[in-house]
Image: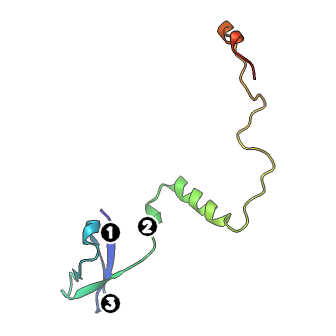
Amino acid sequence: MPTYAYRCPSGDDFELVRPMAEAADPASCPDCGEVARRVFGGPAFRRLDPSLRRALDAGERSADSPPVVTSVPGRSRRATPVTRDPRHARLPRP
């Protein structure tokens, strides 16, 4: 379930874990009991897998000026593997 942040009129911040269907419902402050307003913030990227976070950061850094590519990535020297199976000799060649 998602976590929503709220701010009390007295300035206290707190979080509630509630279903998305109840996101717009009012929330009362656990300290003073007054109705609190919802506070919007950035997503919790600190909980992401570190490799995913690095990929997102790299994508953000390269948004304005992507790195220059000098060769096709993932290409090996041999385009098609050579097989020794005699059944493959009868197949049509490109």
Q: Residues within 10 Å of mark 1 (few under 14, many from 20)?
A: few
Give, as a three-letter code, the residue at label 3: Gly
Number of the label disc, if any, that sits on residue 11: 3
The spot of residue 48 in percent (x, y) is 46, 58
Residue at image point 23% right, 80% down: 27
Residue at image point 68% right, 63% down: 62
Q: In this view, does 46 lie above or below 94?
A: below
Q: Residues within 10 Å of mark 3 (few under 14, many from 20)?
A: few
Q: Distance between the residues labelled 1 and 3?
A: 19 Å
* The quarter of the displayed image where residue 9 is located: bottom left
Residue at image mark 2: 44
Q: Distance between the residues labelled 2 and 1?
A: 10 Å
Mark found first going from the N terminus, 1 or 3 = 1
Is label 2 in contact with label 1 (beta carbons under 8 Å)? Answer: yes
Number of the label disc, if any, that sits on residue 3: 1
Left or right: residue 10 versus residue 74 is left
| The C terminus - image quarter | top right
Is label 1 in contact with label 3 (beta carbons under 8 Å)? Answer: no
The spot of residue 30 in percent (x, y) is 20, 81
Judged from the image, the secondary structure of the residue bearing numbered disc 2 is: loop
Residue at image point 28% right, 87% down: 8
